[in-house]
Amino acid sequence: MEQQLILDRYRPLEELGEGGYGTVVLAWDTRMQRRVAIKRMPLPRDSFGRPAANPPGLAEARTAAMLNHPAIVTVYDFETDADEALLIMEHVDGASLERILDALGDTLDLDEMAAVFSAVADALCFAHENGVLHLDIKPANILVMRDGRVKVADFGMAALSTALGHGVGEGGTLGYMPLEQLEGMRVSEATDEWALAAVTYECLTAENPFDDDTVEAAIVRLETLETPLPSEHVPRLPRPIDNALMAALGLRPSDRYPSIAEFGNALEPHLGDARSGRESLAELASAYHADDFEQRAGLDEIGLWDRLGGRIGGLLLRAVAAIESAWLAWAGLSAMHLDRAAVLGAVALVALAGALAPSLGTVLGLAAFAIGLFVRGSWVLGILVSVAAALWWWFFARRSSGAAVIPLAAPALGVVHLAPATPLLAGFSLAPLPAAAAALVGGLLSVLASALSLSAAPFVSVDASVFVNLDRAALGISNARAAFADPSTYVVLLCWVFAAFVMSYACRRATRLAAMLGAVLGTIVLAVGYVLAEQLAQALGNSSAWLTTSQAVSLAGSLTIVVLVAALGAPMRPEEEDAPATSWQESDEGLL
């Protein structure tokens, strides 16, 4: 089942794992059009059950997460929301070393071990140079890509885990924790060195002699039992490997190498060829890789709107905004009887503004359109359009390209008798308040365009010629005045607003099913609105029929269109009610 977007951007696809820190989720980045892995860690709560503000360890974890090295999993972002910390990481296309070892049931050869060790050692050296400890080196945190490259995940997360109250002993894992970490004593670079040696021991022998069920038992094991030499498990291993590993596995930090670099200098000459090892690891990672993404959490789970939510979606919005802005400017300026070249030049500039900054282009187009109404002597309509457009732009459209573009599509939808789809589409794409505002502006424009094309109530059918024959549109000014003088018109407009709000509220879960349910409820609201409008018209002695067979067909068609839109992909909606705009609501600054 589809879930809400995480941080108003990431579509959860499946849970990859769960541990002491929290859960790891595979997700689709709707803005950058790529898979990501998201580690979700619940924040500690205070005595009242509320998430603690600025818990200790967050700043350190954020710094650690920003490490940039070829052998370290790239971290794209680190955020906190109401009750959890979220680490947004690259999704490594391959398998963990833990999975490979489990599937093999055997040891890595020396070439493979050379590739793993050199990558992990380089990553740790880089982290230590930048003042960051890992503190949870283990096979599960060592990832092998399908091209054979090795990457280390979860830098800095152990310290955060301890700060948030998860895990034990500085957040490490039994079997890969040296004595000082088990005892809760001061940790250092030597702690990571011991863990790397433990992983290397396990890879070369298929045994982990340090694992136990409890911290106490693990401490007793380390203090009382002598660790077998690796060559006792695998006699073919060179004796220098024994010496290097046993030194790095010293009981106390002072017993170990001064640095991981020196540990590598002692061990790597006796391992194999790392390049050959990477080729072999690539085969293992491909063989033991989980099912392909297309099968596990495939592209069929990523809706069309998610895929268009990034740069492609932005380009489409710009194109639509340019067309809408250009027509509004042309319709308004044509009433001024200016030189044709000047009008075309101004229209081109407004279209360019719409393409570069949709919110700016649409407000310029509406301003020109309102001026045209004033020039034609329609002061009431001009004031109505001006006030509605100004309020809509100031509070919503200037922050959201989607809110700027959607309402202006209402007259065009009226040409194909689908104008009632406008409030539903607004609710699908926008948060409740912007959706309601967009529905109101769209409704006003739809009624105006319908009346100008000499249509009668319910003023949702638009003649396409009104867009090109402005002289004919001018003849409909009196009809437009009558439409806006009819109280029934405002009943329908209010129902458009309410339908958009209902649709938007239903779409908060960002799932197809919720969107379809919202479309049905919104259509019912619209139908009720037209019935009430008709009853009001009859009470006022107006014989206009607001809910006719053709209007019922229009509502059914609009519902069908919106259901198909929802079927193509769930709406990209925020996970938190106070989250910022979605990618369809992206600000103009984000599109430039």
Image (cartoon, grey):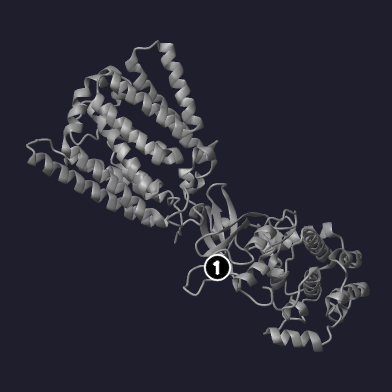
- Looking at the picture, which amino acid does disc 1 mark? Leu
Q: Quadrant of residue 547?
A: top left
Q: Is residue 207 visible?
A: no
Q: Residue at x 13, y 38 (%)?
A: 545
Front residue of 232 and 185: 185
Left or right side of 196 for 84: left
Judging by the rendered image, the residue that carries numbered circle 1 is: 43
Count of labels in the image: 1
- Relative to 43, residue 216 above or below: below
Q: Residue at x 51, y 31 (%)?
A: 356
Q: Considering the image in quadrants, where does the C terminus appear?
A: top right
Q: Residue at x 40, y 46 (%)?
A: 429
- Relative to 59, residue 393 above or below: above
- Relative to 553, residue 333 above or below: above
Q: Considering the image in quadrants, where does the N terminus appear?
A: bottom left
Left or right side of 354 for 167: right
Q: Residue 461: x percent and y percent?
A: 24, 33
Q: Is residue 480 visible?
A: yes
Q: Residue at x 47, y 22 (%)?
A: 349
Density class for disc 1 (Cα within 10 Å; few <14, some 14-19, many ≥20) is: many
User: What secondary structure is marked by label 1?
Assistant: loop
Q: Quadrant of residue 169?
A: bottom right
Q: Residue 475: x percent and y percent?
A: 22, 19
Left or right side of 524 for 2: right
Q: Residue 288: x percent and y percent?
A: 67, 65
- Relative to 194, residue 471 above or below: above
Q: Residue 446: x percent and y percent?
A: 28, 34
